[in-house]
Image (cartoon, rainbow, N blue to C red):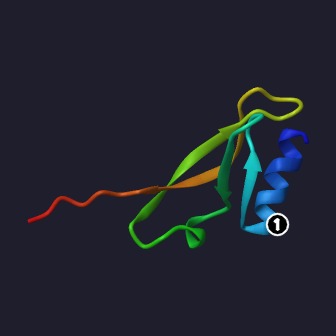
Amino acid sequence: MTCAQAQDLVKRSGAIVLSTGQYTYSRFVADRRYCGHYEILRPSYAPTRDTAQCPVAYYCERVVRPRN
């Protein structure tokens, strides 16, 4: 799929799992609603038919909070 198609799919679905290579997969999310309580958004890129590094959407990154 093209970069625009991948971006649109995430936007319409909210969260998807997309193949990023022959044996690899990544979860892409449209916004913060699809992350856990202790997660933040980070930009996520994937190869598409027309773009080597397409800014597909975001991924959720767990924030490690220091213990007091």
Residue at far left of view = 68
Give percent across and percent down for residue 50: 88, 29
Of 20 and 54, the residue lying toward us: 20
Q: Quadrant of the C terminus?
A: bottom left
- Quadrant occupied by the N terminus: top right
Counting from the top left corner in percent of width and height, residue 11 is at 77, 62
What residue is drawn where x is 83% and y is 40%? 3
The extreme top residue here reads 52
Judged left or right of residue 64, residue 60 is: right
Mark 1 residue crowding within 10 angstroms, few (<14) / some (14–19) / many (20+): few
Q: Quadrant of residue 66?
A: bottom left
Measuring 24% from the left and 61% from the top, which residue is drawn there?
65
As helix, strand or loop, the secondary structure at mark 1 comes to: helix
Residue 34 percent coordinates (x, y): 60, 69
Mark 1, residue position: 12
Q: Is residue 58 above or below residue 21?
A: below
Name the amino acid, label 1.
Arg
Q: Residue at x 72, y 67 (%)?
A: 14
Query: Which residue is farthest front?
Result: 23
The answer to whether 39 appears left or right of 21 in the picture is: left
Rendered position, 13 above or below 8: below
Placement of 58 over or under 37, stated as above or below:
above
Question: Where residue 5 sits in the image (x, y, percent)?
Answer: 89, 48
Number of marks: 1
